[in-house]
Amino acid sequence: MTVPNGLRITALAAASCLALTACISGDDQGTDAEGGDDTIRIGISLPLTGDFAEPGKGVQQGYEAWAAYTNENGGLLGRDVELTILDDQSNADRVAADYERLINEDGVDLVFGPFSTRLVIPAAQVAQDYGFLFVEPAGAAPEVFSQGFDNLFYAAPAVADDHYNHLADAIEAMPAAERPQTAAYAAMDDPFAMGTAYGLKARLEAMGVTTVADEVYPPNTTDFSSIAATIASSDADIMVGGSQYQDAVNLILALQQLDYQPRMAAFSTAPTNPEFPEAIGEKTEGILSPTGYTPEADYPSNQEFVEFYTEEYGTAPGEDQANAWTTGQVVAAAVEAVGCADPEPDCQQQLIDWLHENEVETVVGPLSWDADGRPEGAHLIQQYVDGQIRIVLPEDAAEAELIVEKPAW
Amino acid sequence: MSLFVQSLVLGVLLGGLYALLAAGLTLYFGVMRVVMIAHSAFLILAAYLAWVFTRETGLDPLLSMVGTVPLFFVVGVAIQRLLMARLRPATLTMMSVLLTFSIALVIEGMLGWLFTGTQRRVRLPYGGADFEAAGANVAVVKLIAFVLAALSLLALYLLLTRTRFGQALRATIQHPEAARLVGIDTDRTAGYGFGIGLATAAIGGTALALDSTIYPSLHWHWIGPLMAIIVVGGLGSIPGAAIAAMILGIGQALLQIPLNTTWAQTIFYVALFVTLMVRPQGFFGGRLAQRF
Amino acid sequence: MPSASDRTRGSGLTTALKIVGILALAAAVLSFPSFAANPFILSVGVVIMSYAVLATGWNFVGGFTGYMSLGHAAYSGLGGYATALLIIESGINPWLALVLGALLTAVIAVPVGIASLRVRGASFVIVSIAFVLILQLVFQSWGEFTGGSNGLRVPRPFGPDVLRPEQHERFFYLHAAVLAIALLTWWLIDRSRFGIGLKAIREDEDKAQALGIPTFNYKLVAFVVSAFFTAVGGGLYALWFGFLDPIFQFSILIGSYMVLMSLLGGIRSLFGPMLGALVVGYSVEFFKNEYGDTQFHLVATGLLLGLVVLFMPDGVLPALAALLRRFRPQESSIREVTQAELAEQRNSDPITQGAKR
């Protein structure tokens, strides 16, 4: 029974193998139509589904707004830009395959980066192998910059470790007696989230603040009661959360359930989300958060960005949108300065070299990079003051006074 | 000390929910020798239904059980009668695993498709409320979830021990052939057993929605511990599952004091491996578990 | 299971045809890189070959013993991490690391196999899933050793002068070579006494035990061999892809793809899992192309798996092959059935088949 069967299966396998080869190559000729010389094609892979889908959409809006704005204002080098956006399903295998495809099959002229540190490294590898410039809007973790990518640039003011720098400076400036004495840290096991919390931890420990709790939780944790119990029993003066969004909400609710009242509380990312106040029951007063962007900033291009974006989408842009727009601005500056935008290694190398040597004016301020692509700046610190999220640090950019003693939540 | 008491309280509250869910899982195994991988997917589905219910009506998510519990019972009976009963008895265990696994994937995919992968949480006015008892803070939502689980377990226990249907169900679990000989319609009983199992997922899911974030792939984080619990408790033994759930739930909460969250979760898997090495039939299981 | 009559009937002609068929298959596989229009197509080819290696590896336990492991991603992930960590920590030759890593994984599989195979199926499945979940937790938490959630970059086995397209080509051939070795091993086991014992376990474990087959030892050996080949597949993929992340390495979805591919192609046949890999790998690419932006791939995987389990537990391709066979003239002449009988058979067959299942 198996002899003829096996034979048939072998034949079937051989036939389908050939058919497949013919099929995908044929398929290729259909889609391989080059965009022509009148447009600059930009390839992007974003997590539109899966775990990073929500911020992924923000980045997509930012990119699309930038492309629309650029085309309305004469394009790049006089040519229109056209975005090709693929969905990587928040999966590292897919993100690499996507860039492979954008570069080889779709024949794009430039690539922009994806979202999230976890996806940036595999994607940057592909771009590096084909000699492409790789400017990315998200991927602030220190690991991104220690991989030896010379084509990578992070289009935001600061790497994760430096997000809290202004807050650390402010605490250091306090008289020693008024400083918090003990600190509790809880960070999501994610390169970005941990980077922010541990950046501040290093600074606080250096000025003598004792660490009394240090918890790391996996990204998919939903039950924060035990972590909250540990933190509450440590009764730390300052609570630092390296968080994304929902984890911070859960942690704060769990801390409220245990009636823990820190003197200062700082969480990354979550408090800047517009849904945050409602999610934690409006008890936001005094919560701190670093941010890389504010629509109110008076950098030259920012006003145009906010106006254009608000007109397109009906709301002011957030940090994800701003970082995507910044990516566009950075690449555009290099393209205009060098005067080329094609996939040839020569042109890409010139773009890379130019960015290493120059400063670019963006909506998040002037950006320049070190040899590994780290931006050299710090994040603004925001705080909920009278129910509104306001910039409180550094002082020259402050919109409101820093609340040192956080009211009860 | 207070951290210890606090963790103990949290462990008991968590263990109650585990116990209810593991009881459902072990019920399927008892009546049909089926490892129901989709149990926790239905749990998450029920939590999503509670979330949608609250979002749309603004009413308390607990009220959603009025609809989800009967619905899940019917779905459970349907799964048993229409899908499980079609499988060949010789390969039932393996094929039922694959089948329920595929159901889990479909549920996860549909949830992701409809509601995206974003984490959701029911917003409750009493979400952050707590009271103090015996030196520990007890969150109101956790207590409600625990009471719900305990009442359901009690109801399940009474159903199994005090009713004719319960007797038939236990007979079907212990010896299907003999049960058939004394005139029990084992097929129908198995169907109802499946329905009841799934109904526990509806209750558990609602309880979960009170105090937890939900997202489509969350069910994998529940199915692992739950499967470990039913093996440790002895496959098919409902009291065994409940006891193991309570012990492991408390163990997890207490282990989080010296270890971090991630390592504390491994207690379930360590217990699973130790059980299979030392006592493969489980610590509270009877004769049934030995062959599986 | 080729019986004696099969063999005599097949004789020289069938053997020759078989050899021609295998040669044609090999030629088709080996010529793929020259047909591939660009490096992207080639990289898709590498992924499909990797799937084929993993599915064939899975089939050593799934196909021979009928024990369905849903967590074989544990072994591909371990193979990948073991290879990467051996290179990084001890600096040995990457290919040596690949083999050592796979051996190490096989050693780890021994206690897992002992724990899960002592009792029947249910515990095996539970442990298979639990093992992936525990490894995901451990590799995520144990940051200093595994790189944790930051991921782990795997050093390239080829120098920087080997450009990416050429890497794809080399890895395509490497995967093909591993696949050939795995298939050969499967074929050898299939024809051995050991293989017959394993298949007896699949059909009826109690009877097999009664016949004096050391069922536990047999199952364990098959399981460890399976873990070894899956680990080689995982290690090779890690060397090619160059980046490991616990969430994606120890993923339930990868494990379920292995099951789906094998079931689709037919777990009882040598080339089944490979064919399944071709179908699944190609359709994943195709659906991504057509419907990219939804979570629907999970639903499709689930539905497909459910349908196969319910209606074609022996595999879709074997079912199709059986259907095809009825239309072959020489088949009917061997059986000496009349046209009328054949027609009747054709009509009644689907019904009897349905009833059997």
Image (spheres, helix red, strand yellow):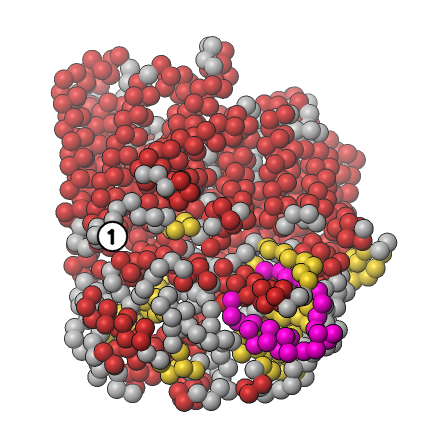
Tell me the chain of label 1: C
Residue B82 in view of the camera: no
Q: Is residue A179 a member of the stretch shown in magenta?
A: yes
SS class of the residue under badge 1?
loop
**What span is colored magenta in the figure?**
A161-187
Q: Is residue C289 left or right of residue A162?
A: left
- Kindly indicate the quadrant of the structure image that contains residue A265: bottom right
In-front residue for pair B219/C217: C217
- At which x and y percent is residue C202? 43, 23
Q: Is residue A144 above or below residue A16?
A: below
Q: Is residue A294 left or right of residue C163?
A: right
- At which x and y percent is residue B219? 56, 49
Instruction: Name which residue lies at 49% across and 53% down.
Output: C149
At label 1, the amino acid type is: Pro
Instruction: Name which residue lies at 63% across and 61% down.
Output: A185
Q: Is residue A124 left or right of residue C218?
A: left
In-front residue for pair A96/C338: A96
Residue labelled with disc 1:
C160
Q: How many marks?
A: 1
Q: Is residue B69 a member of the stretch shown in magenta?
A: no
- At which x and y percent is residue C1? 31, 19
For the C terminus of chain C, which image quadrant?
top left
Q: Is residue A277 left or right of residue C204?
A: right
